[in-house]
């Protein structure tokens, strides 16, 4: 189920199913399809005002819609649910509920009911000459999607591969696309720590990296050279990567914190990793904050280099620390702007899977 809580932790809304308005059956919803959630993995909520909405039962002059977009993983779909409230057109105060938990959007038939498990969902506003539009990104963790799977026309010259077990679908109308690979930049020698030897790693050539074990995918509008650019930040089994579209069907990494750099994040004055570093990195969620920093959740549970117990952590990483020509890609102890644990007045973290900071 989906829970909405206030700042005190009090539940204010719970959703485990939805209803279908006979006046509006979204494309993709099939007769006899389940109306209950099955292993929902992600959700985002937003609010809109709707004036005399069409295609719904019992429309009012002005309505407030509290919307929930859910990655309904077990049912292989994404759904948008709305709580509709009548609003006074003058005071904008809520008068009464009209219909709660109503299905208003469903992944169209080509995107639903297949083998794909949607595990994350994100939305961003994209500026364009027509006044702008919203783009939705959906992460798939259990299989590699292709353009053919969704009926998209693949960009000219793009050859689809079957390798990989994850991907991202960008729902953007006629511009919708599937992302299964990211292009990693060339990394010079000496970028990563080699156990017992120091920063003496071999150089690495630029290459295409298939998405593997995708845990989260978030999109955001960023400004590069003063121009708005849609960026994609993913967390998968090998690290955290941010990419932007370099050409049709090609997404190039512009920022990354791979496992090798994370494991040597905390170092002493001689450049040796400290014993407080965990022995592994399992990034289960990542998001670039409005401040420019990157929030990362490490869900690894095991031991530190010093053999202490480790149950996961949340880090806020300086978004400007990244430097391809510096040891450890520029990341060091001072790159950590905020971290959990420790936590005062509450039980400690244990296998965290999500975090947010506003």
Image (spheres, grey):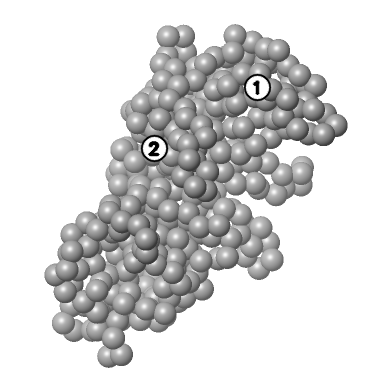
Image point 37% across, 64% down: which residue?
Answer: 344
Q: Where is residue 150 in the image (x, y as percent from the top left)?
A: 46, 30
User: Which corner quadrant of the image does residue 92 belong to?
Assistant: top right
Q: Quadrant of the C terminus?
A: bottom right
Categorize mark 1 by other alpha carbons within 10 Å: few (<14), some (14-19), many (20+).
some
Farthest residue toward the left?
Answer: 307
- Residue that label 1 marks: 97
* Label 2 SS: strand
Q: Position of residue 50 (x, y in %)?
A: 74, 28
Image point 35% across, 57% down: which residue?
Answer: 346
Farthest residue toward the front?
Answer: 345
Res. 153 visible in picture: no
Front-lying residue, 294 or 161 = 294
Q: How far apart are marks 1 and 2 (CA)?
A: 27 Å
Image point 69% across, 22% down: which residue?
Answer: 96
Lower position in the chain sequence, tag 1 or tag 2: 2
Q: Position of residue 253 (x, y in %)?
A: 46, 61
Closer mark to the observer between disc 1 and disc 2: 1
């Amino acid at each position: 189920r989906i829970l909405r809580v206030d700042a005190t932790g009090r539940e204010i809304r719970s959703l485990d199913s939805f209803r279908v308005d006979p006046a509006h059956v979204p494309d993709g919803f099939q007769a006899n399809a389940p109306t209950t959630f099955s292993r929902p993995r992600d959700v985002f909520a937003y609010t809109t005002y709707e004036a005399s909405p069409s295609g719904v039962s019992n429309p009012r002059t002005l309505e407030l819609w509290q919307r929930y977009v859910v990655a309904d993983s077990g049912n292989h779909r994404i759904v948008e649910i709305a709580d509709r409230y009548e609003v006074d057109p003058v005071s904008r105060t809520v008068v009464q509920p009209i219909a709660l938990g109503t299905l208003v959007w469903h992944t169209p038939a080509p995107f639903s009911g297949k083998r794909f498990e949607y595990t994350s969902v994100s939305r961003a506003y994209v500026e364009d000459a027509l006044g702008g539009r919203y783009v939705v990104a959906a992460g798939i963790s259990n299989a590699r999607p292709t353009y053919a799977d969704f009926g998209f026309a693949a960009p000219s010259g793009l050859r689809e591969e079957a390798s990989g077990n994850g991907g991202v679908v960008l729902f953007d109308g006629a511009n919708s696309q599937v992302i299964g690979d990211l292009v990693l930049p060339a990394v010079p020698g000496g970028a990563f720590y080699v156990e017992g030897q120091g920063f003496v790693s071999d150089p690495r050539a630029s290459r295409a990296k298939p998405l593997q074990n995708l845990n989260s995918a978030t999109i955001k509008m960023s400004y590069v050279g003063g121009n708005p650019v849609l960026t994609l930040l993913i967390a998968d089994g090998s690290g955290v990567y941010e990419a932007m579209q370099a050409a049709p069907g090609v997404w190039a990494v512009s920022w990354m914190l791979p496992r090798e750099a994370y494991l040597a994040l905390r170092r002493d004055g001689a450049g040796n990793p400290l014993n407080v570093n965990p022995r592994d990195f399992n990034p289960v969620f990542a998001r670039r904050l409005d401040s420019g920093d990157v929030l990362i959740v490490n869900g690894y549970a095991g031991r530190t280099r010093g053999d202490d117990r480790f149950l996961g952590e949340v880090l806020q990483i300086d978004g400007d620390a990244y430097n391809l020509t510096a040891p450890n890609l520029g990341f060091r102890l001072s790159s950590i702007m905020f971290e959990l644990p420790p936590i005062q007045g509450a039980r400690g973290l244990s296998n965290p899977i999500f975090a947010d900071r506003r």
